[in-house]
């Protein structure tokens, strides 16, 4: 295949979807051309490889289809509404969300209409692979396009909110049955997420495969087990990341601590206020939102004793924890989503899903006297990361899989590959 079409939420604009910075170089190695379609092109444009380009056929992502367009696509509108009726947990919930969902249907119809006119004339299934980075809005739009262009084949990834219903309002994912009707395969960022989708949709179980994300190798980080215990966390400051729980734990520690946090969000003011009340032997530094490259440069030059990740409702294998492990930094993490994929006994301590602040504080107090505070342990952390999450290994395996699937869809090559596909494990890594 010569060309990949990658549909994202914002990437390569702004700071979000930073994990694509690890994946895109491999995609650009394996495809002659990568065209990126961001849904919301907001923020500064990041550097991308020379053979990648950005296209924005939908000028206004919030624009809805007019009455004439909705009438012309009446069948599509009907099927989107039918999907909502099938997926909604109750009529009451659907009625409460209907004004919002009605606007979303108009947006999807408009986007699909634009893609059909401005993008699909360039589509050739023998030459182009189509990839939705989330099983979310673009998956719905591409499904709508596929109704008119049956030759269109696309696959998607699923990470967290697009896997777990409880992360969405009223614990359901609108348009889910419509998305799954048209997507060829959903590549899940964690085993837990894959198994959740297989349980939820048993008739489509073979559509869901494991394809973890990976992080780039920047070498092992510096190690200095002296001075205050150096604790790092990296996440958005939002309720499900439970950074306030870490602050509560730090209020209980007896040993001197230097805590550095990367990331911002809606709880930032609350977290800062709570941190201001910490005892004098706990130093705090908030780094705010930073480019991923800046965070990696910081890790290379600053010794860190332990990375703490206490999120609940995690989806995939937390990329921030992977990045810390790549530097040999031990991880203390709550058991949520796919985090346990990283925590195999060599990388740190896996806590219960809902740990107490006292449990976290006890681990931090005893850290320097335990096995994790040794150079040998850190070598093991990095080794475990290299085996399962090193970016080039993981993403090359992922591309092998999607190219195999694309070739299998070809009438010329499909028959030759059918025997091999029957013996596949269904895992990209």
Image (spheres, helix red, strand yellow):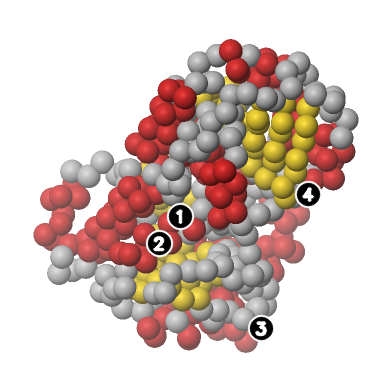
Q: Nearer the viewer, residue 241 or 388?
A: 388
Q: Earlier in the sequence, mark 3 or mark 1?
A: 1
Q: Position of residue 372 (x, y in %)?
A: 52, 20
Q: For mark 2, what is the residue?
A: 25
Helix, strand or loop under label 1: helix
Q: Earlier in the sequence, mark 4 or mark 3?
A: 3
- Residue drawn 78% across the image and 27% down it: 282
Count residues near mark 2 (Cα–Cα under 10 Å), then give few for <14, some for 14-19, many for 20+.
Answer: some
Q: Nearer the viewer, residue 290 or 118?
A: 290
Q: In this orientation, does residue 249 appear?
A: no
Q: Position of residue 324 (x, y in %)?
A: 53, 38
Q: Residue 266, which numbered label?
A: 4
Q: Report the number of numbered marks.
A: 4
How much space separates mark 3 and mark 2, taking CA atoms? 39 Å
Question: Is residue 76 left or right of 404 when viewed as pictured?
Answer: right
Helix, strand or loop under label 4: loop
Mark nearer the viewer, 1 or 4: 1
Q: For mark 1, what is the residue?
A: 22
The answer to which image quadrant residue 350 occupies is top right
Q: Is residue 172 above or below residue 124?
A: above
Q: Is the N terminus in the top left, top right, bottom left or bottom right quadrant?
A: bottom left
How much space separates mark 3 and mark 1, taking CA atoms? 39 Å
Q: Earlier in the sequence, mark 4 or mark 2?
A: 2
Helix, strand or loop under label 2: helix
- Residue drawn 32% across the image and 68% down it: 31
How much space separates mark 1 and mark 4, taking CA atoms? 27 Å
Q: Residue 66, which numbered label?
A: 3
Q: Is residue 55 above or below residue 12?
A: below
């Amino acid at each position: 295949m010569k060309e990949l079409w990658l549909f994202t939420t914002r990437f390569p604009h702004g700071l979000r979807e930073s994990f694509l910075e690890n994946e895109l170089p491999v995609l650009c190695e394996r495809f002659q051309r990568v065209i990126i379609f961001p849904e919301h092109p907001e923020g500064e444009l990041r550097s991308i490889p020379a053979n990648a380009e950005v296209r924005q056929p939908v000028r206004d992502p919030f624009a809805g289809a007019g009455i004439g367009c909705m009438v012309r696509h009446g069948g599509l509108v009907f099927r989107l509404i039918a999907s909502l009726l099938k997926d909604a947990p109750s009529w009451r919930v659907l009625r409460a969300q209907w004004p919002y969902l009605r606007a979303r249907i108009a947006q999807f119809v408009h986007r699909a209409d634009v893609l059909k006119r401005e993008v699909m004339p360039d589509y050739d299934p023998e030459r182009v692979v189509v990839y939705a980075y989330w099983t979310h809005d673009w998956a719905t739009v591409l499904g709508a396009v596929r109704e008119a262009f049956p030759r269109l084949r696309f696959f998607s990834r699923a990470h967290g909110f697009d896997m777990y219903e409880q992360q969405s309002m009223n614990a359901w994912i609108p348009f889910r049955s419509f998305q799954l009707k048209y997507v060829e395969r959903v590549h899940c960022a964690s085993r837990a997420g894959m198994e959740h989708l297989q349980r939820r949709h048993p008739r489509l179980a073979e559509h869901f495969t494991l394809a973890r994300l990976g992080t780039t190798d920047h070498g092992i980080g510096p190690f200095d087990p002296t001075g205050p215990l150096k604790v790092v966390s990296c996440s958005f400051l939002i309720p499900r990341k439970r950074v306030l729980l870490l602050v509560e734990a730090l209020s209980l520690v007896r040993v001197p601590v230097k805590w550095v946090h990367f990331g911002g969000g809606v709880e930032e003011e609350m977290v800062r206020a709570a941190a201001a009340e910490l005892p004098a032997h706990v130093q705090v530094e908030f780094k705010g939102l930073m480019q991923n490259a800046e965070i990696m440069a910081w890790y290379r030059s600053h010794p860190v004793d332990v990375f703490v990740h206490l999120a609940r409702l995690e989806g995939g294998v937390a990329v921030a924890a992977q990045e810390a492990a790549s530097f040999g930094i031990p991880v203390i993490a709550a058991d949520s989503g796919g985090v346990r994929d990283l925590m195999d006994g060599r990388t740190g301590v896996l806590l219960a899903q809902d740990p107490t602040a006292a449990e976290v504080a006890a681990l931090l107090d005893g850290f320097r006297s335990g096995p994790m505070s040794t150079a040998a342990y850190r070598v093991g952390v990095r080794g475990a990361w290299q085996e399962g999450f090193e970016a080039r290994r993981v993403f090359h395996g992922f591309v092998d899989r999607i190219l195999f699937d694309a070739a299998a869809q070809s009438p010329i090559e499909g028959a030759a590959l059918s025997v091999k596909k029957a013996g596949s494990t269904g895992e990209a890594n």
